[in-house]
Image (tube, rainbow, N blue to C red):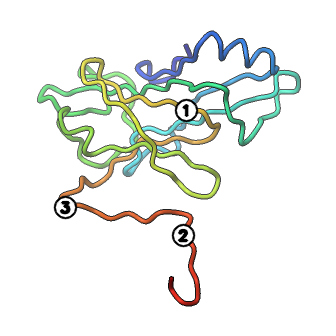
Amino acid sequence: VIMMDDSISYARYSKSLAESLEKQNVKVSVTIEKDKEGGKVYKSVNLQVFNGSNGLEKKGFVLDELVHISFGYYLDDSGKMSSVPPLGGFAAPAFTAPLPAQNDIKNFFALYWFNGVQWLKMGNHFDYDNQSISFGAKFSGDYQLRMVSPATTPQLTSIYPRTITPNGD
């Protein structure tokens, strides 16, 4: 288990993945990127894989199995999501958007992964009992939990890549 510096978020992976990484002579690091948090970005982490011999980062690395990453959150006295523990504690990030009540969190947050070109929306799991939002990561890179506008009406989304032809067909 890799604890993150906010003391409520962590990453963990299986023993079989640990053995596979050791055989490949690579090391995994998951770090919170506070400098990228703020605005509508609630949490930002970077999953990095390093060569065990020379310490150089292996960009674009695909893991054999998922690394489980969990973002913890706090609740204030009224039951709304909070950036800080109820009795104070570490400094709040520059997150400026109003935070929802716990039962609305899944409608207001989405997880994104940066594939080197664009941010892609990923799946995640909301665990209200443990006050956490978790996901599985197989690719190295940046992951962000962002506040999004809840859909009030059905929305169409484009499928990418999309082929554009001169005739529009």
- Circle 3 — which element? loop
Nearer the N terminus, badge 3 or badge 1?
Answer: 1
The residues tagged by marks 2 and 1 sit, at their Cα atoms, a distance apart of 26 Å
Judge whether 19 appears above or below 149 on screen: above
Kind of residue sitting beneath label 3: Thr
Q: Nearer the viewer, residue 63 or 108?
A: 63
Tell me residue 70's x, y (percent).
Answer: 44, 25
Count of numbered labels shown in the rendering: 3
Q: Is residue 22 left or right of residue 108?
A: right
Nearer the N terminus, badge 3 or badge 2?
Answer: 3
- On the image, numbered disc 1 is attached to which residue? 137
Q: State if disc 2 and disc 3 touch (CB < 8 Å).
A: no
Q: Is residue 93 left or right of residue 69?
A: left
Tell me residue 44's x, y (percent).
Answer: 49, 39
- Circle 2 — which element? loop
Kind of residue sitting beneath label 1: Ala
Badge 2 density bin: few <14, some 14–19, many ≥20, Cα 10 Å: few
Judge whether 33 appears above or below 26 on screen: below
**Quadrant of the rendered image containing residue 62:** top right
- On the image, numbered disc 3 is attached to which residue? 153
The furthest residue to the bottom? 167
Kind of residue sitting beneath label 2: Arg
Nearer the N terminus, badge 2 or badge 1?
Answer: 1
The residues tagged by marks 3 and 1 sit, at their Cα atoms, a distance apart of 30 Å
Quadrant showing the N terminus: top right
- On the image, numbered disc 2 is attached to which residue? 162
Q: Of discs 2 and 1, which sits in the foreground?
A: 2
Q: Nearer the viewer, residue 53 or 121?
A: 121
The furthest residue to the left? 78
Q: State if disc 1 and disc 3 touch (CB < 8 Å).
A: no
